[in-house]
Image: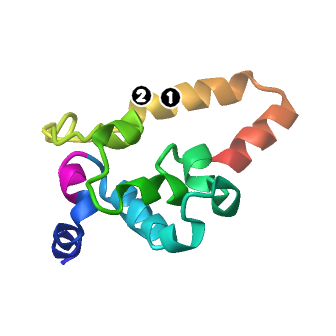
Amino acid sequence: MWLDMFLKLPYTKKLLGMVSRYALNQIVAKYERVSYASIDSSRCGCVMRTTHDLPCAYELARYVVSSIPLGVIHMFWRRLSFSDQGLSEPEVSISEEMETISWQFQELDVCGKVTLKSKL
């Protein structure tokens, strides 16, 4: 369903399969503001560029008639992994991690124990 929506949008075609779905959704949401922000960065606010390092509305205005180049998307959003690393083990255990936490808990003072307990 969402794939059909992105295939209909000419500016996202080069990004399909190259960036995460979350990033694509954010880009489409900001693309809807292009007519409002136009090419004036003061009206845009550039929140997506500063918080997510994704193109903001006024940057997207440059790509109204073309596709968004992959280079304007931060590397974080382009690191897609389809490996099953760690999922092929027949049994999953946290006993080693629990022992480490227990050992660290015993070494703390009362205030530290209360803090660690609240975090857990």
Give residue 41's position: percent from left, percent from top. 64, 54
Give residue 21's position: percent from left, percent from top. 30, 59
- Relative depth, front residue between 108 and 87: 87
User: What is the span of residues highlighted in magenta in the rendered image?
Assistant: 13-18
Residue 29, relative to residue 77: is it above or below? Answer: below
The answer to if 56 sits in the magenta stretch is no
Q: Is residue 16 left or right of residue 48?
A: left
- Rate crowding at label 1 as few (under 14), some (14 to 19) or many (20 or more) other CA atoms within 10 Å: few
- What is the three-letter code of the residue carrying label 1? Glu
Give residue 89's position: percent from left, percent from top. 16, 37
Compute the Cα span from label 2 to label 1: 5 Å
Q: Quadrant of the N terminus?
A: bottom left
Residue at 41% x, 28% y: name it: 96
In the picture, the disc for residue 96 is 2
Whether residue 96 appears in this view of the structure is: yes
Q: How many marks?
A: 2
* Labels 2 & 1 near each other (Cβ < 8 A): yes
Residue 11, relative to residue 49: is it above or below? Answer: below
Q: Is residue 87 left or right of residue 119?
A: left
Task: Quadrant for residue 22, please give it.
Answer: bottom left
Helix, strand or loop at disc 2?
A: helix
Give residue 18's position: percent from left, percent from top. 22, 45
Helix, strand or loop at disc 1?
A: helix
In the picture, the disc for residue 99 is 1
Q: Is residue 49 left or right of residue 91?
A: right
Residue at 19% x, 57% y: name it: 13
Residue 66, relative to residue 34: is it above or below? Answer: above
Residue 67, relative to residue 7: is it above or below? Answer: above
- What is the three-letter code of the residue carrying label 2? Glu
Residue at 54% x, 64% y: name it: 38
